[in-house]
Amino acid sequence: MVSLRDAVGRQRRPPVRRAHLVGLLVGTLLVLSGCGQAALAGAGSSSTPTPTPTASASATNAPPAPLKIVALGDSVTAGNNCGCTLFPQLYAQDLTRVRGVPSTAVNLGVNGQDSAGLLAMLTDGSSSADRAVAAANVVVITIGANDFGSRHDDVTSGSCTGGCLRDTTEHMAAEVTRIVARVHALRSNRATAVLITGYWNVFEDGQVAQRLFPGVGLAATAELTQQVNQALRQVAARTKAAYVDLYDAFKGPDTDGDDTPLLADDGDHPNAQGHALIAKRLLAEGLPGLDRG
């Protein structure tokens, strides 16, 4: 006798129709195909992420850095006998106006300063000059005339002419070279515009000099001034500084060779008009070394 369980266990399952199997396969394929296409579509439609701006791109859009000027030098820089706005401040004002960036000036000129004294000031750890130069990206140097102060009477009388002060000139040039090197060391060789000015005269000039000195003394003074300026020009070329010619500026066609209107009553230092002219010449020189940096 066959039990009920056995009877049930032997029952055959109803046959699956072929058409039904085909439908299942087709449906599966369609689903798989749809997923693949969706995946491909998703990959194709994904947009490329916007690149993060690079540092150089950000720097391009950054505002220009402020210009910080330090003026180093002698009584010309210090503004002896002027009682006016001095050329470092005028120069800063002109840079602000022309370049459109804030520009400030620190005047470290010292009456009677010579090249050795300026170098010592920049190497004295207790001086604030080294910190001021380290923070400045524009440095103006006017130095050298006082290196010849002890021979003033010999030159202006005409007893010292030609190459009688060649050794002093060479020593002065070597000191100025060291000054420029010290500036770059204090700046840690960051981009810096260094401008070295010449002189219209290392001693008195204009009508004051014509009244005080004989013709041979005037000629000797003019000759020494040219030698000093040439030495300063060479220092600027060697150190990649800019040489700012003040001789032609003071004695050019605008003055017909007589710079009296640009000088104070002592005939030695620039007056307000002279300081304005110096600032103008500095501005015209540009900022080599800084613009390249």
Image: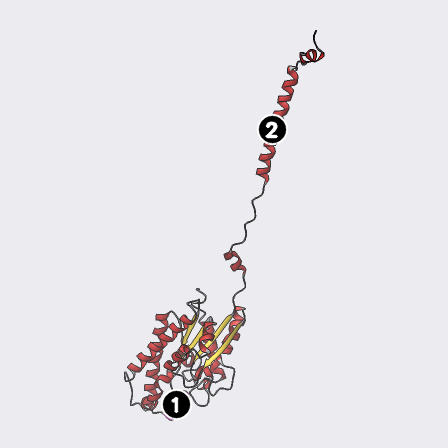
The tag on residue 49 is: none
> What is the x, y in percent for residue 137?
47, 70
Outermost residue toward the right in this view: 4
Q: Is 48 included in the stretch rendered in magenta?
A: no
Outermost residue toward the bottom in this view: 212
Q: CA distance from mark 1 to mark 2?
A: 104 Å
Q: Secondary structure at mark 1?
A: helix
Q: Using a 10 Å C-alpha cutoff, classify the residue at mark 1 as few (fewer than 14 neighbours), some (14 to 19) or many (20 or more).
A: many
> What is the x, y in percent for residue 165?
29, 84
Q: Is 208 included in the stretch rendered in magenta?
A: yes
Q: Does residue 144 sit above or below 67 in this rendering?
A: below
Q: Amino acid at mark 1?
A: Ala
Q: Does residue 220 sit above or below 236 in this rendering?
A: below
Figure quadrant of the C terminus? bottom left
Counting residues from the start of the chain, the first of labels 1 and 2 encountered is: 2
Q: State left or right for residue 5 relative to residue 281.
A: right
Q: State left or right for residue 56 relative to residue 23.
A: left
- The residue identified by callout 1 is 209
In this rendering, the count of numbered labels is 2
- The residue identified by callout 2 is 32
Outermost residue toward the front in this view: 1
> What is the x, y in percent for residue 132?
47, 75
The image quadrant that residue 212 belongs to is bottom left
> What is the x, y in percent for residue 118?
40, 80
Q: Secondary structure at mark 2?
A: helix
**Residue at (54% x, 59% y) in the render:** 61
Q: Amino acid at mark 2?
A: Leu
Numbered range of the magenta stretch: 206-212
Outermost residue toward the top in this view: 1
